[in-house]
Image: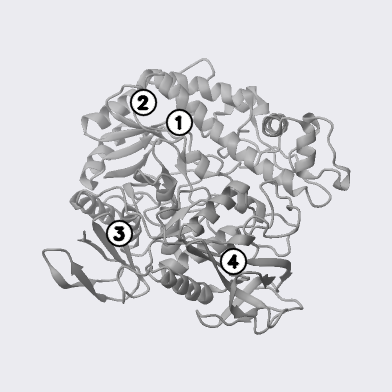
Amino acid sequence: MHYGGDYNPEQWSEDVWAEDVRLMRTAGVTLVTVNVFSWSVIQPRESIFEWEWLDRVLELLHENEISVDLATGTASPPPWVSERYPGVLPQDDGGATLWPGSRQHYAPTSPDYRRLAATLVTELAARYHDHPAVVMWHVNNELGCHTPWDYSDNASAAFGRWLEARYQSIEALNKAWNTVFWSQRYADFSQVLPPRKAPSFHNPGAVLDFKRFSSDALLELFIMERDIIRAAGATQPITTNLMGPFPPGDYWKWAAEMDVVSNDAYPDPNDPEAFRSLAFASDLMRGLKPDKPWLLMEQSTNAVQWRPSNARKQPGVMAAWSIQSVSRGADGVLFFQWRQSRAGAEKFHSAMLPHAGPETRVFREITALGDDLRSLPKLGIGSRARAALVFDWDNLWAIGDEALPAQLDYNEIVQRWYNAFHRQHIGVDIVNPRSDLSGYDVVVAPLLYLVSDQSAAHLSAFVEGGGHLLVSAFTDVVDETDAFRPGGYLRTLGGTFGVRVEEYDALVLPGTDGPGFRSATLDSPAGPLVGTFLVDEIHAVTADVLGRFTDGPIPGAPAFTANRFGSGVGYYLATIPDDAGMTSVVRWVAEQAGVGAEFSGLPELVEASRRDQHVFFINHGATDVWLDIPTSDAVNVGVERVYLGPQEWTWLHRP
């Protein structure tokens, strides 16, 4: 179990380094990430490399049995880069240049940036590929965090090449994007621009492809650096830190190129549901590479500095959230950063060693966490749940289009469906529409607006093989190019759900004012439900109608249906329920599939998660709880009574 965080010794004089290492050993640190933002220190001029300070840092850490996750340093170019090669700088959609003075001031497609970054990584890997301190390599840092969408001329040229590779001919692109509309027909790929600031709506197919291209451009940077490191003879695992359900990066595609998945997580301590969003991100990371553990690469020990209001973590929260990640498959808990910066943009960002030094609550808590991690038993990779939730970047991007019946936040709505599982203690895996679903009993696929033929066949096969599949309004509307299929809506999954969709109606958006229906109530076997955002007008073909709208724009119309398809059932819910409705529907559909909570009777704020033969219980509430946990192994059958104070946790061996 790795434990530690980012270490930036270049911020401090060498006399501080010895104290750092001594306190790291006190805290139980086993791994530190070095060299994330050191490009300007290593290469002060294009022709000069200065490695001696890094040599000394690595030797000091190795002598003290602290391993190193060696970063490539490419996340923040030195001032001389943009001075000599101004074309490396990115631009926003209005053509404004994003200048140096912060970080990530580079266009991912800039040939000069790529050449200079490759040179740096080549020199770094040649020097340290077999250094005994280095146990992992860390490419760049939070790729795309600040500059996910670049609209520069470099991006424009690269976008054209990407489109040509995808469509092969300009005629195929014109057909996919329907460019005869609004006189957008292209004669050559060189005419296609990124979706820069325009008078009105952009072509949705073009925007979707630009987002796919932008994700691929960032992934190319990772692959470039990874391949250089491997070519130097390095055999250690190579990673880059992801950022949960980060909209600009298709992490399903990225994870396939990574040796180990790692994640940065910064939930807001002021958010009472923050522990659920952290659980969702953890399960997403676990799902990206379900056959391997992952790493919590960054989190804060206390407050951050980048929100309008930066609350600290109350006592116990840091440990509870850390253990939550471990319980969901993490084999490492790390922080940004080791020693709090004395100046700069992140001087108020907390650290393992605060400004006030080791005689502080934070340092006592991180030392105690280090002790706890060392005392954990050997943990397996993780346990597969019986329920799954579909999360898909193509749909996230397509749902972000402005010209839809209603403005929908894909990330938020999928997270709310996840919360419906989480608050009922039903384990759920995060999957994509192309994942192997054969081992699941129930799958929920929210807002599956965009469906490829391959995804549709995959989902239909899951139902036909005996699975229970639940979808909500606005499902199977367009193909992978964001275009309608001939014949209208639900063209690939209509047989699976046994309904026909005639049209969509928008409700007044939650939290806004205006004329029209604010909700649409329906009856259902899960109880009365309140629908929001959208109402689908559907007609049952082979499906049984389980519930009808009782008010709203189409009272009396079918609202909730079930269709026997093969050995399974497809459920169509013709709206997007509120949180209470999501909870009720998930409970009911899971019951139909024979899926429930592994431990019944737990308070809502007590989390239970299984990792192979070990179950972790975490009390995220503010009051004490007593838990009666059944035992059912061959040696001991009965009930074990467990006490947990606020933000306390424990684990039990449960085969």
User: Where residue 215 appears, x then y in whole percent?
Assistant: 59, 40
Disc number for residue 64: none
Q: Residue furthest left?
A: 635
Residue pointed to by mark 2 = 54
Of residue 286 and residue 361, the one placed in the foreground of this image is 286
Residue contact between numbered discs 1 and 2, judged by CB atoms under 8 Å: yes
User: Where residue 619 appears, x then y in whole percent?
Assistant: 31, 68
Residue pointed to by mark 4 = 472
Mark with earlier residue (3, 2): 2
Looking at the figure, which quarter contains the N terminus? top left
Residue pointed to by mark 3 = 610
As measured in the structure, the alpha-carbon distance from the residue carrying label 4 to the one carrying label 3 is: 28 Å
Q: Is residue 195 left or right of residue 278?
A: right
Residue type at mark 4: give it. Ser
Residue type at mark 2: give it. Leu
Identity of the residue drawn at 44% across and 36% down: 258
Identity of the residue drawn at 49% across and 53% down: 305
Q: For mark 1, give the secondary structure.
A: loop
Identify whether 363 is placed above or below 241: below
Mark with earlier residue (4, 3): 4
User: Where residue 37 appears, x then y in whole percent?
Assistant: 46, 34
